[in-house]
Amino acid sequence: MADESEHAEEMTGAEIVLRALKDQGVKDIFGYPGGAVLPIYDELFQQDELNHILVRHEQGAVHAAEGYARSTGKVGVVLVTSGPGATNTVTGLMDALADSIPVVVITGQVPTGLIGSDAFQECDTVGITRSCTKHNYLVRDVNDLARTIHEAFYVATHGRPGPVVVDIPKDVQFATGRYTPPQNVQHKTYRPQTQGDHSAIEAAVRLLASAKRPIFYTGGGVINSGPRAVVALRELAELTGVPVTSTLMGLGGFPASSDQWLGMLGMHGTYEANLAMHDCDVMVCIGARFDDRITGRLDAFSPGSRKIHIDIDPSSINKNVRVDIPVLGDCGLVLEEMVRVWKDGGLSMDREALSHWWEQINVWRARDCLKYRRSDDVIMPQYAIERLYEATKGRDTFITTEVGQHQMWTAQFYRFERPNRLMTSGGLGTMGYGLPAALGVQAANPGALVIDIAGDASIQMNIQELATAIQHQLPVKVFLLNNNYMGMVRQWQELLHGNRLSESYVEAQPDFLELAQAYGWHGIRCTKPADLDEAIREMIEMDKPVFFDCRVANLANCFPMIPAGQAHNEMLLGEDEKDAEQAGV
Amino acid sequence: MTAKEDHLAIPPASTYFMVEEKETEERHTLSVVVDNEPGVLARVIGLFTARGYNIEQLTVSEVHHDRGVSRITIVAKGTPHILEQIRSQLRRLVPVHSVADLTLDGDPIERELALVKVKGEGEKRVEALRLADAFRARVVDAHTGSFVFEITGKTRKVDQFIQLMKPLGLIEVVRTGVAAISRGPEAMKV
Ligand SMILES: Cc1ncc(C[n+]2csc(CCOP(=O)(O)OP(=O)(O)O)c2C)c(N)n1
């Protein structure tokens, strides 16, 4: 692996790390120091090109790097120490793996001579992180270090993106070795296929043109693929007039203001999106993976349709659902070629069939599945998000969320027009994701409005990051839908476990205003619907971190809902009467 | 549609659902060419344990020392769908160069080696030797009261031999697992 060039520069391992990061275009890194990375921290201290953001927990560092990556399309970088520093990153790594987010995590390790001796703060980092990374490395020779870091960036960003760990023993950081520049450092063999097979694409386009009830089922792959995919998706949708839905991960990949937008699909998706999925005759799955939250009961999933699946990861194809035409490749490139083939072939849809299909969809839409009972006394959580959307839609706003009902209401009621504007833990469902992710987004997008829509249980899982916002002047907002419950757990208990609310009430809740103020945040509390707009305006206009404690109806449920294991046409719709009654309205 | 009984019909406490695989299981021999780097075997095995796939046999050895390339032969059992997943999950591992399903591609040559220790005297000893001869097993160690046989062949043949040795005083067996290669002039991509 060592570079053979005679002119290679010599430097210490710690210098190599920083040089490699700079050469990879890194500007910001998220980290937390400790014994096994002190040489690297010492180098950081003596330079000012790389900006280090000091988190308060290593899990927060990885989520911040994820937020950074998701809002920019660039790699998020993390630096932590050995042992507990490394183990604290595990949840973040798994989160990034589940959502295909490119992150490079550099961990310190005990000196090579001590590896295997149960040394102080030693852990088998590559062993522990093997199944929660896309790939990982232990670097034993300083001459391999630069190349390994460059390769880590290559692996993190090529093919289906994901997290990569580079574990560097302390003696390797001190040792002197050759620096290899990034040019032409690729993995020896890892070459994911990006260009789709032309005949598969032609077959897909032909099938699409023959459809009477088509649908585009899009996912995070469209966003990961980048702006070209978003443009091409829009163009193909406009050319064909096909309705579009997306997963949680794909929101923003297609503008919510479009007439062709059906809303999100899946467990808490819209009635129209799920029924259209169920009844379609041709489904084009673009960068999504037929996850169980999307398909519901597999044997009842879209029983009458022919399926086209565009994905960069061959293992996603035919994993959960058999497809008729798989197209292996990058969504952007494949969509662009579909557009070309469509235009060159002078193709058109069956207009009459398509307008019947839209009539049917409009009947479903008229069911108004997101309807909820309004109240003048209590803030309904859905209303809070609607008002937040109205107040922020004119600006370039980035939203992160925690996990729970508030997350699903965000997906339902906040209308995303552009990609990279929603950062949420989809695959792993990690409570505590939203606040650190927001910090990462803000670091990457200074001046933008960044809001973590939070739940009162989740926010407490990485609450320590309030300090990071102050130290690094990251003026993020926490918009807390405070219902005093682990709302999503309580909802499942109500609907599926006889309303036995086992351990889902959040007792001993702190006073969030005082807590936020203790960290130096500005605090706002709102309890009445009539005060909401003004309070939101105050939050938005404040150029510092703001913690907004929005007291919402405690017992509201998130509908529609397809209980796990049911089919798309067995959806529970909001019994708004009962729901409102229970919510204490 | 919103009747409570309906959603109570699914098993409680599960946020997942179970699907029964209806296809029948097959046994396939896979060849996996990998970079011979630390942890690569753990990655391959970890994939099987993490995803609940069955490995029946696994052998590994470096095959191109200069290129640092190893070849792993895996005998795996699963439905055609699971076997397809195994292949594509293996291909996804960064240090994996190529994956071939030798069973799918044809009828591969498969060999395995076993060392079989048999203890016995008199009639049984004679019978063991006679059978070993018939199976073309070689005697690689002989004492007055015991033999060690070396047998090479398909898994079925090795199984059979071991089975026959049982009543004749079999006390210990060690097997290498299968090494497999395709027939004909084509070589596997490295
Ligand atoms: C780390 C972690 N632990 C547990 C869960 C299970 N879980 C999912 S949602 C939820 C409740 C979240 O409550 P809250 O943050 O208050 O949001 P709400 O649902 O009330 O909007 C829990 C405990 C999880 N997703 N992540």
Image (spheres, rainbow, N blue to C red):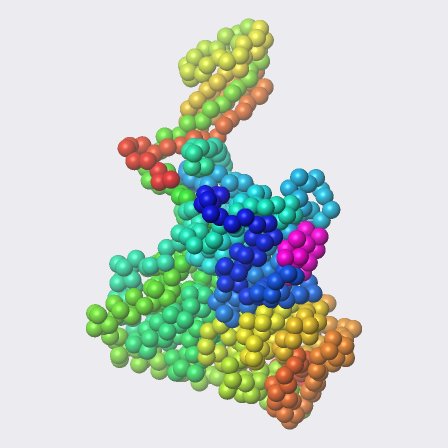
Q: Position of residue A286 (x, y in %)?
A: 39, 66
Q: Where the C terminus of chain A falls, by quadrant?
A: bottom right
Residue A308, visible in the rendered structure? yes
Where in the figure is residue A232, as x and y percent of width and height?
35, 72
- Above or below for A92 versus A417: above
What span is colored magenta in the figure?
A31-43
Membership of A335 in magenta stretch: no
Residue A320 shows in the view: no
Determine if the magenta segment contains residue A39. Answer: yes
Q: Along the horizontal axis of the image, is B174 left or right of B70?
A: right
Residue that extends furthest to the front in the rendered view of this protein: A7
Q: Position of residue B112 (x, y in %)?
A: 45, 27
Q: Residue at x 49, y 23 (%)?
A: B114
* Residue at horizontal 34 percent and vertical 67 percent from the top: A335
Location of residue A570 with respect to B169 vertically, above or below: below
Q: Nearer the viewer, residue A381 or B122?
A: A381
Report x, y in % for residue A419. Answer: 46, 74
Q: What residue appears at the point 71 percent right and 76 percent down from the top-left corner?
A: A484
Q: Quadrant of residue A245?
A: bottom left
A584 displayed left or right of A347: right
Quarter of the image for residue A67 reads: bottom right
For the stretch drawn in magenta, what is the main secondary structure? helix
Asked if A387 appears above or below B130 in the picture, the reply is: below
